[in-house]
Amino acid sequence: MKFRQALFWDTDPKRIDPIKNAQYIIERVADFGNDKEARWVLDFYSKRLLKKVIAKSRCLRQDTKKLWTLILKNN
């Protein structure tokens, strides 16, 4: 996946490793990603990891957490 600079404004998107930076990617896409990026996250990462990151994140907005909790429950 080629990440948008607007999504990762604080770093060079080319230097992001999808495995090493999984939590960072999941949080950014959950809060600011578009449909294509959200679908990629759902396809790339395990449901277990996604649930863990969403539940434990301290930077996600509460509305984002609620939405992703519902998505993961029904997906």
Image (cartoon, grey):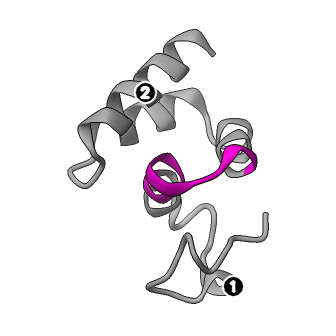
Q: Is residue 66 above or below residue 39?
A: above
Given the current orientation, which residue lies at the most extreme left position? 58
Q: Is residue 1 left or right of residue 24?
A: right
**Range drawn in magenta:** 27-36
Amino acid type of the residue tagged 2 in the rendering: Leu
Residue 30 lies in the magenta-colored region: yes
Q: Is residue 15 above or below residue 65?
A: below
Q: Position of residue 31 (x, y in %)?
A: 44, 50
Q: Position of residue 51 (x, y in %)?
A: 43, 30
Q: Quadrant of the C terminus?
A: top right
**Circle nearer the viewer, 2 or 1:** 2
Mark 2 lies on residue: 67
Name the residue: 53% across, 75% down: 8
Q: Quadrant of the N terminus?
A: bottom right
Element carrying mark 1:
helix
Name the residue: 51% across, 66% down: 21
In-front residue for pair 18/6: 6
Mark 1 lies on residue: 14
Q: Position of residue 73 (x, y in %)?
A: 50, 13
Res. 52 image quadrant:
top left
Q: Is residue 1 above or below residue 55?
A: below
Q: What secondary structure is the stretch in magenta mostly built from? A: helix
Name the residue: 66% across, 36% down: 42
